[in-house]
Image (tube, rainbow, N blue to C red):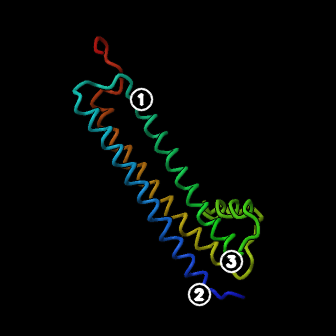
Amino acid sequence: MGSGWGQDWIWGLGLTALTIAAHAMGVVMTAIVLTRVKDHLTQRGRPLRHPVIFAASMVGAVGLLLGALHGAEAIIWAAAYVALGAIDTWGHAILYSLDSMTTRGASKVFMHEEWELLGALEAADGMLLFGVSTAFVFAMIEGILPIFIRTGGRRRRGRP
């Protein structure tokens, strides 16, 4: 083990802290926007015209934003792999990072032996990040349901 596991832990915990902070910032900013949308919709005093489309659109938009956030976090890890010389090419580093973050682990790309622990630390980070995303989507859906239930889940005839 050339670099020793100490460097793996230092880099791994640092990258974990960085990506979790970035993820928290993205989730909080998204929550602020969603809260404003919800407040606007509930204050207007009229039921939604198409609550199912609204709910599906909100979940889809949040899913897209979270996917982009996870992708950006994988890029951060991949950049560290290349900078440290743990993986030689950018393409392999991205593939390895996405594979580790999602805990899939089937890419057949391998890190240089002295940095192997770093991939396991990214997998642990990925579980935390996806856990935060899952909790956020669940909370968001819970916030949308009262709007959906208030409107009766259907378009009301005779109303704009």
Q: Residue at x 64, y 66 (%)?
A: 79
20 relative position to 41: left or right? right
Residue carrying label 1: 52
Q: Is residue 56 visible?
A: yes
**Labelled pair 1, 3 in contact (Cβ < 8 Å):** no
Q: Nearer the viewer, residue 123 or 3?
A: 3
> Could you tell which of marks 1 and 3 lies nearer the N-terminus?
1
**Image quadrant assignment for residue 76:** bottom right
Looking at the rendering, in which quadrant would you find the C terminus? top left
Residue carrying label 3: 116
- Observer-side mark, 1 or 3, equals 3
Q: Residue at x 30, y 41 (%)?
A: 36
Task: Give above or below for 31 relative to 156.
Answer: below
C-alpha gap between disc 1 and disc 3: 46 Å
Residue carrying label 2: 6
User: Residue 23: x percent and y percent?
Assistant: 46, 59
Task: Give above or below for 114 relative to 132.
Answer: below
